[in-house]
Amino acid sequence: MPCSRKPHGLPKSERPAANLKCKASSGDPFPQIDQRSEEFEKVIKSVSRVIDAMPLLAQPHFRRQAFASAERAARRSLPLGIRRLISHGTAFECPVCESRVSRFRDFGNCKNAWCPVCGSMPWHRLAWLFFQNKTSLFDGSPKRLLHIAPEPELAKRFLAVKGLDYLPVDLDPRRPYVKERMDITEIEYPDHSFDGILCSHVLEHVPDDRKAMREFQRVLKPGGWALIMVPLQLNPTVEDPTCTDPRERERRFGQFDHVRIYGPDLADRLSEAGFSVSQFSGRDLLSSDAEAHRMKMWSKAFHCSK
Ligand SMILES: [Zn+2]
């Protein structure tokens, strides 16, 4: 299962240098050089990422993923009514934007993956149904939800929920909808701060994922829950911290910036962090296989209770 997320929770040794400013001595006639150095550093880092990924452009499915990502972003810029009109149909339905569409669109090698109206992927639709059917998130009473690396299609909906104190965070505070910067391996909030946590397709990017899981457990209130979703394989988890070559990561972990590919034993890691863990799929939230088929939800998720 592909994902299009950016690295999150990198260890300090892999984070951008915190301060490579040129030191301006007292009376320096060009003090603005500090700011220029920071901007230059950001540009160099972005260019480096593109160069790292260049060899992957030779792979057809990577090109298809990149094209799909661009198309999703372009569609989001259209008015909702136009998106619904050009995608209208009866074969499929999206619970996130409540649209009926003729088909979902492909993402890389995944057929019928994303909603042409809101851009939701199968795991977004699964998460939304979970919130609707298995939580009290929408009952109007005050709740505090921590959303790691917010997906625009879900963030828009959460922002409209009455009574919800919604905190979307990311390692990169410049990403859309992000309210504040957060390293999930060092969450700067006290114990028992949140009623719920949504962390979807992030942990496979995080070198010290166990520390992130412990942090989730710490900041949840007693009785709180975390919804964890990652790309899954049938075999046990494979990881190798020494594997840093993008092409090798693509081959072994499924994407150039993944540090591992999880298996069902992810449940054990979550349990070790102190959670009571259960797994579910779309079929567990819906009344029939046909309904699950119409929403194209093939993902599995981990419901972690504190
Ligand atoms: Zn949708």
Image (cartoon, helix red, strand yellow):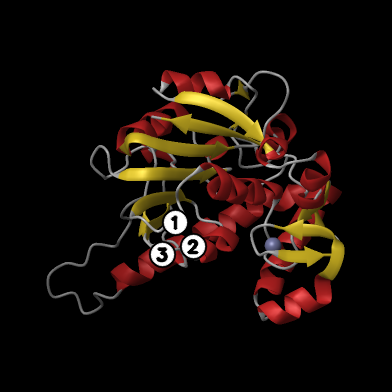
Of the numbered discs in the image, which one, if any, rests on residue 175? 2
Q: Dot 1: few (<14), some (14–19), or many (≥20) neighbours within 10 Å?
A: some
Query: In this view of the protein, can residue 242 be seen by the observer?
Result: no
Query: In this view of the protein, can residue 48 be seen by the observer?
Result: yes
Compared across the picture, whether 213 is left or right of 125 comes to left
* Residue 105 point in image, percent of width and height: 81, 59
Q: Nearer the viewer, residue 255 or 123?
A: 123
The disc, 2 or 3, on the residue closer to the chain's N-terminal end is 3
Compared across the picture, whether 105 is left or right of 234 comes to right
Q: Residue type at mark 3?
A: Lys
Residue underneath mark 3: 162
Q: Nearer the viewer, residue 17 or 212?
A: 212
C-alpha separation, residue under disc 1 versus residue under disc 2: 6 Å
Compared across the picture, whether 74 is left or right of 21 comes to right
Q: Exactly how many numbered labels are in the figure?
A: 3
Above or below, 224 against 124 in this view is: above
Residue underneath mark 1: 172
> Could you tell me which quadrant the C terminus lies in?
top left
Q: Is there CB contact under 8 Å for labels 1 and 2?
A: yes
Q: Is mark 2 within 8 Å of ligand 1?
A: no
C-alpha separation, residue under disc 1 versus residue under disc 3: 27 Å
